[in-house]
Image (cartoon, helix red, strand yellow):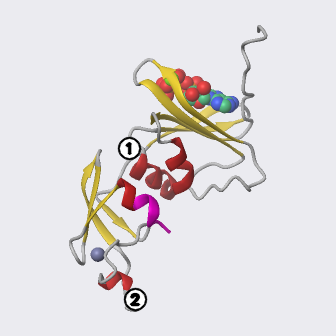
Amino acid sequence: MSEKDLRVSKIKDGTVIDHISAGYALDVVKILGITGHERRIITIAINIPSKNFIVKDIVKIEGRALNSQEVNRIALVAPHASINIIQNYSVVKKLEVKLPKIIEGIIKCINPSCISNSNEPVTPKFYVKSEDPLNLKCHYCSYILEKSDVLCNFN
Ligand SMILES: Nc1ncnc2c1ncn2[C@@H]1O[C@H](COP(=O)(O)OP(=O)(O)OP(=O)(O)O)[C@@H](O)[C@H]1O
Ligand SMILES: [Mg+2]
Ligand SMILES: [Zn+2]
């Protein structure tokens, strides 16, 4: 390896989120609730040359295997991502990112008058009208949310 090939080390156990559309890695870490204050190694790579996507982003999280709910969250901001679970430095499992047709509980409605934003015990619920670009319709008030709304209104 020459001086100019600076290489990021492999992670031992954790998750690699690969094939994120270029420019969306920071949205992925945000929707996972990663602040950077966790005591773990997190590698965020943006605009990496790739065959299929020309450029892509990658997020690598040491010491944390994502569960299916977290994988669904990623689908909201990076529907083409692939999830690789790493154990002992190798990929042991690949998970498909798949956006459910109905999103319940993760996102808040942007309409302040929506019943889901009142004191009523109502769980927010959205229908996925389009995945990419993301378009969600509130079950209660029919407001339409886009990706930028989702990124400021998730729990
Ligand atoms: N131990 C590890 N630490 C960090 N990253 C890893 C590790 N093992 C694999 N990766 C990364 O995880 C991703 C998937 O690895 P894999 O070996 O399955 O590559 P691939 O054959 O190109 O997969 P795909 O067909 O999904 O593109 C790649 O981006 C790879 O660089
Ligand atoms: Mg590959
Ligand atoms: Zn609403």
> Residue 113 got which mark?
none
Q: Residue 35, how many percent across, how many down?
A: 66, 56
Q: Please tell me which residue is depicted at 39% across the width and 38% down the height of the picture.
A: 80
Q: Position of residue 8 (x, y in %)?
A: 72, 27
- Residue furthest to the top in view is 2
Which residue is tagged 1? 79
Between disc 2 and disc 1, whose residue precedes?
A: 1
Residue located 71% across and 40% down the image? 13
The magenta segment is 150-155
Query: Disc 2 beta carbon < 8 A from ligand 3?
Result: no
Magenta stretch encompasses residue 35: no
- What residue is shown at x 24% (from left), y 78% (from top)? 140
Q: Is residue 154 magenta?
A: yes
Residue 82: image location, x then y, percent = 47, 37
Which amino acid is tagged 1? Pro
Q: Nearer the viewer, residue 78 or 82?
A: 78
Please, what secondary structure does the residue beneath circle 1 have?
A: loop
Relative placement, left or right, of 15 versus 95 is: right
Q: Is residue 118 above or below residue 105?
A: below
Q: Quadrant of ligand 3?
A: bottom left
Please rate how many residues cluster around mark 1, counting C-alpha atoms within 10 Å: few if below 14, some from 14 to 19, many from 20: many
Which residue is the site of mark 2?
121
